[in-house]
Amino acid sequence: MLVSLSSILKAARKGRYAVGAFNCLSLEQARGAVAAAVQLRSPLILQVAEVQFPCAPMELIAPVFLRLAVDAPVPVCVHLDHGQSVETCLRAMELGFNSVMFDGAALPFEENVRKTKEVVRAARVCGVDVEAELGRVGDAGTDDEGRQNADIFTDPAQAEAFISATGADALAIAIGNLHGKYIATPKLNIDRLREIAGRIATPLVLHGGSGTSIEDFKACVHNGICKINVATALQIAAAEAVYGGEKTDYIGMKNTIEEATRKAVSWHMDLFESVGKA
Ligand SMILES: [Zn+2]
């Protein structure tokens, strides 16, 4: 069943567990994620990020997510991850996503507040929930050195002000986490997480969930993180399974399939003499 982000995350916060938000770029990934949720009787968040649109356009993947969610016997939320503009968030709402993230973390605080509010206002009209981000989650590979730099961590007082100004339903925070494939396992700042969770009742979100240590995951789950984003780990698992552990490039694999299909279809079209008849 299609269930709101708020109700999934409020139950998680109350029950002190976290719900996985899995970035799925294909029918196979989305069906695999739903199969796990059904088998384990777990709530699930299916999501796709704006940077992933070249590989999985939201217009194409939204109907897949929504149909899977409606048919599933467990709660499933269909979420836009890292919407980079207000317009993308609005478009996602039109397509039926019942939750959107507006990522204004790179903007100055006031502008992040203003744009997040704009998304929240539109979302309220459509019955959609909104995740926002405060503090900077870096990218693995480029920001590894900076990950212990507390200057980019989410400030607890600012988080409180941000939530009361915007009314966002979930907040992604920076506590030393990075997106992508970590070179070294990061050490998350759990004290900072506790401070933030102590100030706001809003469910907190951990981005960059691939490659975190088991100990840190557990500490996050028990100290206020209610949603954990997992993207890279799924891509690695899929590509490794197909290539026998030799390659980890899921998007490359997907492109290879698409190109091979294009060539095979072209060969048949030529054989059937339908070329130029459209
Ligand atoms: Zn993220």
Image: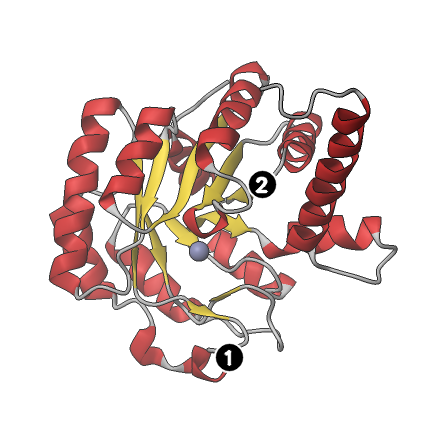
Q: Residue at x 27, y 24 (%)?
A: 127
> Where is ligand 1, by quadrant?
bottom left
Which amino acid type corresponds to the residue marked 2 in the rendered image?
Cys
Picture coordinates of residue 273, whole percent (x, y): 75, 21
**Closer to us: 118 or 257:** 257
User: Against 86, is 161 above or below?
Assistant: below
Q: Is residue 226 left or right of residue 257?
A: left
Which amino acid type corresponds to the residue marked 1 in the rendered image?
Asp
User: Against 276, is 143 above or below?
Assistant: below
Marks 2, 1: nearer the viewer: 2
Picture coordinates of residue 72, whole percent (x, y): 59, 19
CA–CA distance in space, label 2 to label 1: 25 Å
Residue at the far bottom in the pictured view = 145
| Residue beneath disc 1 | 144
**Closer to us: 36 or 225:** 36
Label 2 Cα neighbours within 10 Å, binned few <14 / some 14-19 / many ≥20: many
User: Against 184, is 242 above or below?
Assistant: above
Label 1 Cα neighbours within 10 Å, binned few <14 / some 14-19 / many ≥20: some
Secondary structure beneath dot 1 equals: loop
Quadrant placement of the C terminus: top right
| Residue beneath disc 2 | 24
Q: Quadrant of residue 87?
A: top left
Picture coordinates of residue 231, whole percent (x, y): 57, 51
Q: Earlier in the sequence, mark 2 or mark 1?
A: 2
Indicate yes or no: mark 2 CB to ligand 1 under 8 Å.
Answer: no
Q: Residue at x 34, y 44 (%)?
A: 101
Q: Is residue 195 left or right of residue 221?
A: left
Secondary structure beneath dot 2 equals: loop
Q: Residue at x 12, y 49 (%)?
A: 165
Q: Of the numbered discs in the image, which one, if any, rests on residue 39?
A: none
Is any atom of residue 169 visible in this view? no
Q: Is residue 161 left or right of residue 126?
A: left
